[in-house]
Amino acid sequence: MNREQRHIARRNAASKLHDAAEILENAMQSAGMARGEKERFLDWAVGTLWSQFKEERMNQRIVIENEVRQRGIRFPNGTVKKEYKVSFDLPVDKISDITLDGAEELGLTLKVESDGRCTLSGHPLKSGDYTLTLRYATVEGEPCSQLAIPVAFNPNPRDLWKNIPTDENIPYYKPDSATEYIKVEAGAEGKPRKDMIAASQRGRSHAQEGKARDDHFSLYHCDDSDWYIMAVADGAGSARYSRKGSEVACNTVTEHCKAMLLDNKEFENTLRDYVEDRDNQEKRAALTRNIHDILLKGAKKAHDKINEIAAAQEGLQPKDFATTLMFAICKKFEFGWFIASFWVGDGAMCLYDETTKTAKLLGVPDEGEFSGQTRFLTMPAIFRTSDVYNRLRMTIVPDFTALFLMSDGVSDPMFETDKNLNSYAKWEEFYHNLRAGFPADEIGGVDLTDDNEAAKDQLLGWLDFWSPGNHDDRTIAILY
Amino acid sequence: MRRLPVYLLIDTSGSMRGEPIESVKVGLESMLSSLRQDPFALESVNISIITFDREVKQILPLTPLDELQLPEITTPESGPTHTGQALKLLCEQIDTEVRLSTPDQKGDWMPLLFLMTDGKPSDIQLYKEMIPEIKKRHFAGIIACAAGMSAKIEPLKELTDEVYSLDTVDSTAFKKFFKWVSDSIGVGNRSIGATDNLVLPPPPAEVNVIV
């Protein structure tokens, strides 16, 4: 366009504007508007339309805000220092400049993809309830929109446990942990002999409140008779003096068995007789009688002893000392290992052998429909029914890898169900975990080689393994 | 994993509208944050909330504490209080949600029940019928709370020996009450497993013990 043409164009535009003003003027006149009102009318018309325009723009914003709100964006709860990730969609064709205020301070980052896919991720720095604010722009000229979204981060339960020592002045105080190693050295012929190891650790739930350990164990090897005796008892969490109950139970049966086995030629001869002629009912009955005298009477003695202690104190009942009990006596004979046991309550007692790939439970754990329900040595009914005979087991095997006795503080997290307790594969896994530890949780394994006394501290350390929801006292005794 | 199921039955009838229900919400929020500081609770407590007015709703199915987000609680303008219906729904939910020990799974801990009402059951017939059903469900503890002056104690006493009352239905009272509930859940967590009854921590001054 040259100068001449531009001039013509300007003149045309001016003339058009003049024409339009004239048309407007005429229209206002024919509408009956007085001269003085025309300007006021124009003010009003522009003002009204401007408001309408703004309202429409605001409505557009509100529609978009509603759309965002209706997406129902919710952030699930997270856990401190654990990976957190949540995805959601935003209508990026309608909104822009998206930020999530407060996320960064919590250690989280928001990423918005071009298709509207948003991801909030990171490792939450601190626990608590927080509100994050989603900010975004909608229509040009409208203020920034925002949406508050609550989010909660749980503390890591492992960081919350306290370890309050038990008050040593409480009645029947016992240390918060215990270990023992019984080294049985090689005989004259130089062959290694089995050792016994045990460890007992107060559960985190007790440590949290400075309450005493309720579990107990006892180990004994008679150098003269070569009998091995081991016992594990789990005092009921709610019984006031169950820590004493478990102690009395273990010590009483150990003492009883010790005395019974020290020089019991009759029993050992009956056993040999039976082994030579296993189908002979009479010989079997004779052996059973001996077993009753040793194991059943031992258990009954422990039951009675607890009743005595309870009766000696006003206001106390045997159930205040409620405890489970499992114990076993073992000896190596020329025909193989003889193992006899008694078990009331939960936990696990198992004869494990890698050579024959067998894991034999020495009884049936007493469990109810709900967790934590079991039977106790202290219940009057235990010795009143013939059921008590089912609590006895005896077995003869050429050899075995290990005999385990453990309270439910160990067996529950390790096996969870009865079915697993009866599975050799699970016991194999357990034995592996025992020796390898749990490296991810910085829990070391136990070196179960012959005569390794250091293993008892390793075993105590191993009992600190982590298992959500399982923080009962843990006790394990092993003959290997 | 073994869970400790905790059922909260909350009266949402018309009389709870306004400040009372808002106070309940504040109380519930503070109960959750207090429970989240308890490592054992954090790993085992599962909470369900059932509200009852004319309608009975499980507004929160049994949910692990660490995943739990409090749902909206609404109250109608007015209408009856279907406490019996609420107990019926509770039994149904217990039967489907609470796991029992089988050879293949470890059972849950015995559940706890907290019931809070500011009135009396409008469906008293059904309420009475449900009481033996509730007793069959093996709760480790049932704690009933009569909130405010018009709450009736007698029907609650038929349900449990553990009946408590709140003189007022403001946020202080509910906050204290739910703090005590969370302490009781903590105790429940630790003492379960015995044949004895649950021994509750002493209630705060705002919570009266009904003998």
Image (cartoon, grey):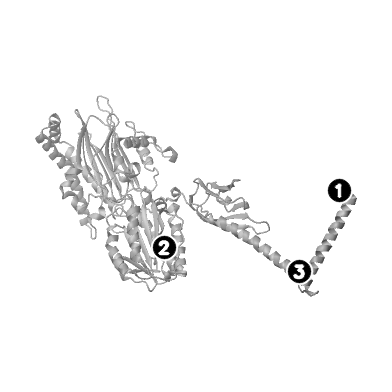
Image-quadrant location for residue B145: bottom left
Amino acid type, callout 1? Met
Q: Determine whether, in the image, residue A227 is placed left or right of residue B107.
A: left
The answer to which of B127 and A78 lies nearer the viewer is B127
* Disc 2: which residue: B178
Q: Determine whether, in the image, residue B67 is placed left or right of residue A173.
A: right
Specify the subunit that label 3 lies on. Answer: A
The image's mark for residue A241 is none
User: CB atoms at circles 1 and 3 under 8 Å apart?
Assistant: no
Q: Position of residue A9 (x, y in %)?
A: 86, 54
Amino acid type, callout 3? Leu
Q: Residue furthest front?
A: A30
Q: Secondary structure at mark 1?
A: loop
The answer to which of A331 and A72 lies nearer the viewer is A72
Looking at the rendering, in which quadrant would you find the C terminus of chain A? top left
Q: Position of residue A384 (x, y in %)?
A: 16, 50
Q: Residue furthest right?
A: A4
* Disc 1: which residue: A1
The image's mark for residue A42 is 3
Instruction: Tell me how far mark 1 sits from mark 3, CA to CA.
Output: 36 Å
Q: Determine whether, in the image, residue A75 is placed left or right of residue B120.
A: right
| Circles 2 and 1 on the same subunit | no
Tell me if I can see residue A168 in this picture.
no
Amino acid type, callout 2? Phe
- State how many labels appear: 3
